[in-house]
Each structure stands twice: as C-alpha cells, then as structure tokens.
C-alpha cells in the first residue's frame, strides 16, 4: 500500500469489490481533492476488472464513516471564480454518479459519522446500510457553513426520500440517528452488532443485499425512477414551499441565506431530470461559495476547531485529572456548575453557609440533571442514578478532598478571601482552587494565598446549562499547570474555555458593558427603546440590549458598570438611567419590572412602562435624530474599540479568542464571523473614517493605536492572529 493512500480496494468474494476508506495519520476521513482522485482511480480499476456484481464502500475507522469535504481546501479556494467553483462541484457529481450508473450494485456500509460530502457519496450509492450505534449519524450540515450540498446531495436526496424529508434534512442541517434515517428511507437496512463486530457484519449484510438484488434487479428500476423529474402536484409543491419558507424565515431571520436558497433550488429542480438538477445545484452552490456569510461561518468553524485543540498554554503541561469537584456556594451559579459536573459523571461536594440554601441546592441540582428533554418531565430513575454523585456537607475535610474546589459565594472580596484563608491550608498539593467571581480581580483575590500558582478564575455564565463559554482567568502568579488543568476540566464539562490574563471585567463583560451602556445613553438622546432594540436585532444579536439589561438584572449591570468606571474613568461614561431604575426598585425580570414591565402569566415578553418613559425623559438633555445605521455604529463601535484595547493590553493569547468568546458568551452573530472578523470586513481604514463623526462624544470613541497602525499599513486584525485560518 502506497504511503498516504486513503482508499484500498479488496475483493472479499470474486465479484464483490470492497473500498475501504481510512485516512492515514488522521482520526477523520475527509474528501480532499487527493482522496477524490484516489476514488476515481479505484473505480476505474473496478470497471477494468469487469464481472463485478457489487461494490461496497466502508470506512476503516470505527465510528467514523466520512466527515465531509476538506474545509482547509475550501478556505484555500475561497477566492476562486464562479466557473472554478462550478467545475469543482461538477467534478464531484460526475465522480459520485458513477456509483449510480455502473454495472454493479453500489452500497454504502455506514458506521459512525456520515456527513456533508460523505453523506453525498452515500446518497449516490444504490443502497445504504447503517449500524445502530450512538456514533452513527447521517446529515447535511452545509447550511451551517452558509452553503448547501454541491456534489449532488440536493438533486439526489429528494428523489430517494421524498421532497419534504429532503427539505427538512438539507435546510435544517441537523444529523439523523440510524432509526430516524431508516424511517425516512435513507437507510435500507440496519445492523446491530457489538463494536468489534460491526465492520464485519456490515460487509456481510451488504453481500447478502447484492445477492438478493442480483435476482430481483430492483436497483435498476430505482435508478431509472430516480433519474427522472419528481412527480408532485402544483398544490403539494405550493404547500411545501409556503410552510418550509415560513419556517426557515422564522429560524434564520433572513440572516442566513443558504437554507432558503436550498429550498428554492430543490423546489425548482423537481420538474427536471437528475442531471439537470445537478447542473442547477452546481450553479447555485457557486453563488453561495465565497459569499460574506460563507466566509464568516467558515471562520466560526475554525474558531471552534482551534478552541477544541487548544490546551490553554503555550508550553507543555500534563493537566491534572478531575474526578471530583467541590462547589462552595449553593446559589444560582453553584447549582448550575454542580449540575454540569454531575451530568458528566463527576462527583460533587456541595457546601453553603446556609443550611436552607444547601438543601435547596441539592434539590436544584437533582431536578436539573434528572430533567428529560424529550418527555419534558423529571426522570426518577435518573434522579436515583445521579443522587449518589452529590454530597451536601458542611465539613471542610470533605470539601478539601476534591480535585478542584470552585468558589461561587456572594460577590464580596473580604468574604471570599476569608473562605480561601480557611480552606487553602487543608487542600491537597495537586488540588486547584478556582473562583467564579464575575468582577473581582483574580490577582487581588490571590494576594493572601500561600500557593497563588494553584489558583485561577473559572468564570461560568448564567445559565450554566445553556452557556458554552467559560473564561479561564490567569492571575499574575497562576501556573501553566493550573491553567492546563482548568482548561481540560472545562472541556470535560462540555464547555469552551477561553484563557485570558486578569483584567477588569475579564473579557465578555468588558466588551458587553460599553455596548449596553451606549444603548442606555442613546435613550437619553431621545432614541426610542424600540429603535435601539431593532437596530441590535437587525445586526443579528439574539435580543436587544434593553431586554438584555432586564434579563441580566439592573443591579448586576450597575455593579459591573461601576467596576468598569473605576477601572477606566477617563473613557467610561455612566448612563444615568440604569441607576435611576435601580433606585426605583426596578431590578430586572426577576422582580417583574426594569426597563419593561413583566406579567408573569405572559412569560418573557415585556411591555413598555409609562414610569420608565418618565425616568428616561428626565435624563434627556438634547434630543437628536439618528438613522438605524448610526444607532448600530454607536452601540458596536465602543465594543470594537474596547476589543482593540484588550489586544493592546495583551489580555488574550490570540485575538481570535475575542471573537469566539463573544459568539459563545453573548450570541454575537455567527454570520458576521466574530467582532474583529466583522471589523475586518469593513476594514481598519474605513473604520477610522466611520469613527470621525463620533469622536466628539469622548475618549471611548477615539481610535486606538492598534487600529491606526493597521489602517496605516493597509492590514487587517486577522493579520495579527498567530496563524490565519480564514479571510474576511
Ligand atoms: P447566589 O446569591 O445565588 O448564591 C451565593 C450563595 O453563597 C448563597 O447561597 C449564600 O448562602 C452562599 N454563601 C455566602 N457566603 C458564603 C460562605 N462564606 N460560605 C459558603 N457559602 C456562602 O449568587 P450567584 O449568583 O450564584 O453568584 C455566586 C458567584 O458567582 C458570585 O461571585 C457572582 O459574582 C458570580 N457569578 C454570578 C453570575 C450570575 O449571573 N448570577 C454569573 C457569573 C458569575
């Protein structure tokens, strides 16, 4: 076997060809250009041999069929011309279509992940057999990258599983498990076997299928049927088009064009034959490829991939193993973090100064981990299974026996320091101590510690079960070993940790507050709440900043705002409205009133309040007119400029961490690729121009050194990244 060879051809029986895909030195199989060339060569060899009754395609990697096209090549081709993209799509279609036009029956024997280009290769086969395992899944996630399948997926899938199923599968981008794939008609047979026997059983089942179809010839009739137009009445088409487009519009809010384009393509291609549908697909694919949204989503893909591989430190350190965690403070955060541990099978010791809070904490943890999403009820069996993992205690010895001790008590420096002074002497040498503080500097908290090297910030977001981000904050004396352990631990909890140096507001709050504060200042310039909210949502934020104030809580925002004001008095301006709301007892959704009034019977949605209108009115000094573009710029430029100061202060190891943190931490729109990626799409020089009209508002709008440098050199922010993965 040649070095770097991915596909091998063998003949388990004289007339059965078996292609095994197994990329060397890689734990995933990808359809790179080189692998496509190999496939072509192997199919030529099968054709040359003749007298082949069946060809079986399988992977040599357990639990991994094919993970799709090679996205690194996509990035490299991102500036290709439309003709070049069309020819790449056409080439894949032509190659795969050989599996549906050959003399033999072709079967994809699927164990593990079968997505994207892999799912297209499989859909071109006459038949698919899938293993029933929790790793096996089938799907077309291309829309998540701003694309749709381009190697025949949109043309062939509706012909096999029906238009409605195909629309759901391709425009939704979610993968199906084996049973659902079977019901939909994607899988023609399902194999159940012990892990070590799956590969063998799949091939046996495929050979049985070849023998049966040699007699029946069913696949030849299917080929004929699937090469023709799809017969659907105008009414059926109209109904499907209307319901699907309404649903897609609701999901994408018009920000993600690919699902709608896929829908329109599939509806339009019902009346033509398969190969014409493929032509339409290739042209449509080229229109999406390289678009701004495609570039942004590819960037997000790379940001996530980079984060998964990041150990959190530049050098080498073996992270400590975390099998048990202690949570001090059984409030909102303590419960959320504890539940995340229990869900991953990590034993938790819970402590609180208040016995009542401790009892409520255990209840809260168990009810969260026992919640069954499907039945929307508490699963008592799960409660019984998980309960032994939670130990509520007031005994220090039990707390200090844990591999990691996380403090989540009230936000008070002295109380936290007293707690550390009490616990630290009792900790094991290899235990790490973490604080979930949202605003107290980690270096300051470490001041009284004997071993500040074993201490770091581990800042989870609320609600923990929903928020993937964890800020891992390095104090001045935190060791690499502690950071590596904290990062590995956060990943074990299923979170995405971002490591940063200590600084006011850490990362997300430091960027979020200037944006929210600016929104409140706009109200004092006479802008309507609705206009502020609309501008943010049109930009792509999941909710407007005013609603966000109410969700986070006015008290929390006022406190966090004060931290920022103390840290950066020369540029921060406090919005008067928030402290007035606080004084009026309007604390947030939690007490039913803040910027909006909340009626608990109508969950979530707030109503504008005449009291708030008066409070705002009293702060208006000069009423001004703003376009929606100006409102957007007013809110997002301070956020961007603050991000450039984070770069200047060397708070992050790579500026792309800022982009990922905001996507995960505040829902910054992925279709914009990240804050700095978005800034690059405008360009530093243009940004300087755009900032000019706002500079009179104060220092917070003044261009920073790094921005000016980039503009002068004609460079972009991503040029400063350690290695550039994507191009805006
Ligand atoms: P909480 O008020 O819900 O819970 C705090 C718990 O700590 C209470 O049950 C209290 O009885 C207990 N406690 C107070 N002093 C204690 C002591 N000396 N020993 C043991 N237990 C003690 O507070 P929450 O919201 O859970 O916040 C906890 C920490 O997490 C704070 O530092 C906060 O800044 C931070 N944080 C809060 C977020 C939020 O959205 N609530 C988000 C991220 C961080």
Image (cartoon, rainbow, N blue to C red):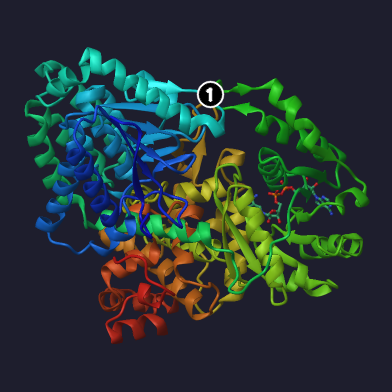
Quarter that holds the N terminus:
bottom left
Q: Which residue: 67% across, 60% down? A: 486
Q: In the rendering, at what x and y percent does residue 253 appear?
A: 30, 41
Which residue, given by chain and number where applicable, does mark 1 sit on? 374
Q: Residues within 10 Å of mark 1 (few under 14, many from 20)?
A: few
Quarter of the image holding residue 382? top right
Quarter that holds the C terminus:
bottom left
Q: How many marks?
A: 1
Disc 1 under 8 Å from ligand 1? The reply is no
Quarter of the image holding residue 726? bottom left
Report the side of 717 relative to 195 (left or right). Answer: left
- In the displayed structure, 43 sits above or below 602; it is below
* Residue 189 makes an appearance in the image: yes
Q: In the rendering, at what x and y percent does residue 543 appear?
A: 42, 46
Report the side of 299 relative to 260 (left or right). Answer: right
Q: Which residue: 91% across, 64% down? A: 425
- Front in this rendered view, residue 526 or 416: 416
Q: In the rendering, at what x and y percent does residue 343 appear?
A: 66, 38
Which residue extends farthest front?
A: 14
Q: In the rendering, at what x and y percent does residue 151 appear?
A: 21, 43
Q: Secondary structure at mark 1?
A: loop
- In the displayed structure, 281 sits above or below 109; it is below
* Residue 672 makes an appearance in the image: no
- Front in this rendered view, residue 355 or 125: 125
- In the displayed structure, 637 sits above or below 548; it is below
């Amino acid at each position: 076997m040649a070095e770097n060879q991915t596909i091998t051809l063998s003949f388990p029986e004289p007339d059965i060809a078996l292609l095994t895909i197994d990329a060397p030195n890689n734990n995933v199989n990808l359809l790179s250009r080189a692998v496509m060339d190999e496939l072509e060569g192997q199919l030529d060899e099968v054709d040359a041999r003749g007298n082949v009754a069946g060809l079986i395609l399988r992977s040599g990697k357990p639990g991994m069929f094919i993970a799709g096209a090679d996205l690194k090549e996509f990035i490299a081709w991102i500036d290709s011309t439309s003709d070049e993209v069309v020819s790449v799509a056409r080439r894949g279609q032509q190659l795969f279509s050989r599996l549906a036009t050959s003399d033999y029956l072709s079967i994809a024997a699927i164990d593990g992940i079968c997505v994207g280009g892999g799912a297209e290769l499989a859909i071109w086969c006459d038949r698919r057999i899938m293993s029933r395992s929790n790793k096996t899944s089938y799907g077309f996630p291309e829309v998540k990258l701003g694309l749709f399948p381009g190697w025949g997926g949109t043309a062939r899938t509706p012909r096999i599983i029906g238009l409605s199923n195909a629309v759901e599968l391709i425009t939704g981008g979610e993968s199906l498990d084996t049973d659902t794939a079977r019901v939909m008609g994607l899988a023609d047979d399902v194999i159940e076997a012990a892990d070590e026997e799956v590969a063998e059983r799949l091939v046996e089942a495929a050979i049985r299928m070849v023998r049966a179809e040699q007699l029946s010839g069913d696949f030849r009739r299917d080929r004929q049927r699937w090469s023709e137009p799809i017969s659907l009445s105008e009414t059926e088409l109209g109904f499907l088009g209307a319901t699907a487009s309404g649903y897609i519009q609701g999901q994408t809010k018009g920000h993600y064009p690919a699902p709608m384009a896929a829908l329109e393509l599939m509806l339009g291609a019902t009346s033509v034959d398969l190969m014409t549908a493929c032509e339409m697909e290739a042209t449509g694919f080229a229109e999406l490829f390289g678009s701004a949204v495609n570039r942004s989503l590819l960037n997000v893909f790379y940001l996530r991939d980079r984060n998964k591989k990041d150990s959190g430190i530049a050098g080498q350190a073996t992270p400590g193993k975390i099998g048990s965690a202690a949570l001090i403070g059984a409030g909102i955060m303590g419960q959320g973090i504890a539940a995340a541990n229990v869900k991953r099978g990590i034993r938790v010791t819970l402590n609180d100064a208040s016995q009542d809070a401790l009892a409520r904490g255990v209840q809260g943890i168990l009810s969260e981990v026992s919640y069954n999403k499907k039945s929307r009820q508490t699963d008592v069996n799960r409660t019984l299974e998980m309960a032994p993992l939670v130990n509520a205690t007031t005994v220090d010895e039990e707390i200090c026996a844990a591999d990691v001790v996380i403090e989540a008590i009230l936000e008070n420096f002295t109380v936290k320091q007293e707690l550390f002074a009490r616990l630290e002497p009792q900790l094991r040498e290899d235990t790490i101590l973490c604080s979930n503080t949202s605003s107290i500097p980690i270096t300051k908290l470490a001041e009284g510690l004997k071993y500040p090297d074993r201490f770091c910030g581990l800042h989870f977001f609320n609600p923990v079960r929903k928020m993937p981000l964890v800020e891992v904050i390095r104090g001045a004396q935190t060791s690499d070993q502690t950071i590596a352990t904290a990062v590995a631990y956060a990943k074990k909890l299923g979170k995405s940790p971002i490591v940063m140096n200590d600084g006011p507001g850490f990362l997300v709050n430091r960027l979020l507050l200037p944006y929210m504060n600016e929104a409140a200042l706009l109200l004092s310039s006479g802008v309507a709440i609705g206009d502020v909210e609309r501008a943010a949502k049109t930009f792509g934020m999941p909710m407007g900043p005013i609603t966000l104030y109410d969700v986070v809580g006015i008290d929390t925002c006022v406190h966090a705002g004060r931290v920022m004001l103390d840290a950066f008095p020369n540029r921060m301006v406090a919005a008067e409205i928030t402290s007035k709301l606080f004084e009026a007892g309007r604390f947030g959704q939690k007490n039913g009133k803040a910027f909006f009034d909340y009626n608990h019977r109508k969950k979530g949605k707030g109503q504008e309040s005449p009291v708030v209108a008066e409070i705002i009115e009293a702060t208006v000094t000069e009423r001004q007119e703003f376009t929606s573009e100006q409102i957007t710029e007013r809110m997002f430029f301070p956020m961007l400029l603050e991000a450039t100061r984070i770069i200047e202060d060397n708070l992050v190891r790579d500026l792309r961490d800022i982009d990922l943190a905001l996507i995960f931490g505040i829902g910054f729109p992925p279709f914009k690729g990240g804050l700095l990626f978005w800034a690059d799409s405008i360009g530093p020089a243009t940004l300087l121009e755009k900032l000019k009209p706002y500079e009179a508002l104060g220092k917070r709008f003044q261009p920073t050194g790094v921005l000016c440098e980039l503009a002068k050199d004609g460079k972009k922010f991503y040029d400063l990244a350690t290695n550039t993965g994507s191009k805006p």
